[in-house]
Image (cartoon, rainbow, N blue to C red):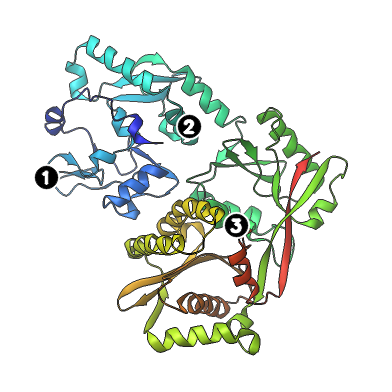
Amino acid sequence: MSMTVLQPLPQLVSRTACAQCDVCCRFPEPDSFLRPYFTAREIRAALSRGLAASCFDDPAGTQVTLVHDPQGEGCLCPAFDPATAGCRIYEDRPLDCVLYPLALMWNAQGTEVVLGWDTKCPFMRESLPEDIRRHAERVQALLQDESVLATLGDHPRLIGRYQEDVIELSPLPAVTQRLRAHRPDERLQPLRVVDAPRWSRRVRTGGGREEIPLAAYGFAYHYIWTSTLPYWWMEVADTYFLFARSPDGWFMPLPPVGPGAFAEAVDRAFDWMRDWNAGSPVSRIEQVTDAQAAVLAASRYRWASEPPEYVYRAETLISLAGDAYKSQRALCNRVEREHKVEFRPYQPSDYAGCQALYARWSEQKRGGSLDQMGRWLLEDAAAAHTMAWVAGARADMTGMVAMIDGGLAAYTFGYWLTPSVFAVLLEVADRAVPGLAQACFRETCRVARGQGAEWINAMDDAGLSGLREAKRAYHPAQLMARGMVTAR
């Protein structure tokens, strides 16, 4: 959500009154349900203003992690400065804080979203009712904005639970309707980083049933995009269904996973999507293998191929032996000859270095021969990389960085698909250092091989000719076919 929508909102409580208050931004316990909620965009803004990545459990959207109050008991919001009684990120504070002391919550019956005012705010207890009413009317008008409604729909946890000490001012039917539209089935749950263990049990262990599953059977493959595209899951009849909601409607970025009949699960999924999308042609299932497509009724579904995934033998990518790898060998030797490169595991303290490198790398890419599709993908990728930096380990990712002359010059992130298959998810290397990208890829494979990897899944080429040439130059041992299923 663009916060410019809410900038015209005048603050009902003056800064002077806030500075004298000892209620806001302070909490009696670390897991207080009153902690402000940050959306993915708000988290990125807070990080850019200096808040630590450890303040946020889930960069896709979460309540802030509180810190101990150094001057007394209880906890503080990490953005709060007790010395000045001010907010360190005031200009980029989250919607949750912008609205306060008004609050969004469900009514006592849990059937409708309402706007209320929080009597815990001392100023509100002294303010004139007419002033509160006029302010609430301005807030209600802003809550009709499409960008705000979309944000609330994507982040239902912005709507608090019912509180007796919050006085209801008015119902918000547009917000209630949007939340229901964003979650058309009560069984749907948003995909969050805490779901990684469940994914490992239900999806990775049963994904695809092939020796080398597609990269999409890894939790990280989807999780890094949850800050830009809402993902939802549900389990029905012992089958795991993953859905994503695009601006055009609902689709499945992964086929159903479960012990039951695959065709029946697909039929059920399409029935749901047809209802949710009101007949829109956006309904589809991605990452379907040709073997899976073969068991579907040809009269009901069509299968369209997508760029294949590239799979290599780990030993081959480490040795780079023979004339076929002469170019890659030479580049690795060059960077080792010209620079002292130190490889080590990614640490949370590397966040700022990765952020700076990504910005530099993006400019280098734009200055090259990048086509329009490549530029669009580059723009979308920034948020995904941030997700890896902030929550990589919790999302089953492993990261590695390359240091040159004390500066962070490259990083990679990947994950295990099976005990013998490692998938390389993200790779960024300073393009001003020839051979660094090749050396990082080789080192990533070396580390994975040392931990048991026999195969390296380098994913697809996204239909980009330059990336296709680079992946083919490493001579894949297997091109894994995959496609998309749609209804006829």
| Residue at the image point whose x is 47% and y is 51% from the top | 379
Q: Name the front one of labels 1 and 3.
A: 1
Tell me whether the residue at label 1 lies in contact with that at label 2, contact meaning CB atoms closer than 8 angstroms.
Answer: no
Q: Is residue 448 visible?
A: yes
What residue does disc 1 label? 83
Which is nearer the eye, 245 or 258? Answer: 245
Crowding at dot 3, Cα within 10 Å, few <14 / some 14-19 / many 20+, comes out as: some
Against 119, residue 398 (above or below) is below
Residue 244 percent location from the top left of the image: 60, 42
- Describe the element under mark 3 as helix, strand or loop: helix
| Residue at the image point whose x is 74% and y is 64% from the top | 210
| Mark earlier in primary sequence (3, 2) | 2
Tell me whether the residue at label 1 lies in contact with that at label 3, contact meaning CB atoms closer than 8 angstroms.
Answer: no
- Describe the element under mark 2 as helix, strand or loop: helix
| Residue at the image point whose x is 16% and y is 26% from the top | 14
Kind of residue indicated by mark 1 = Ala
> Mark 3 and mark 2: span between their CA atoms?
30 Å
Label number found at residue 150: 2
| Residue at the image point whose x is 58% and y is 38% from the top | 245
Q: Is residue 325 left or right of residue 151?
A: right
| Mark earlier in primary sequence (1, 2) | 1
Residue 204 percent location from the top left of the image: 64, 58
What residue does disc 3 label? 200
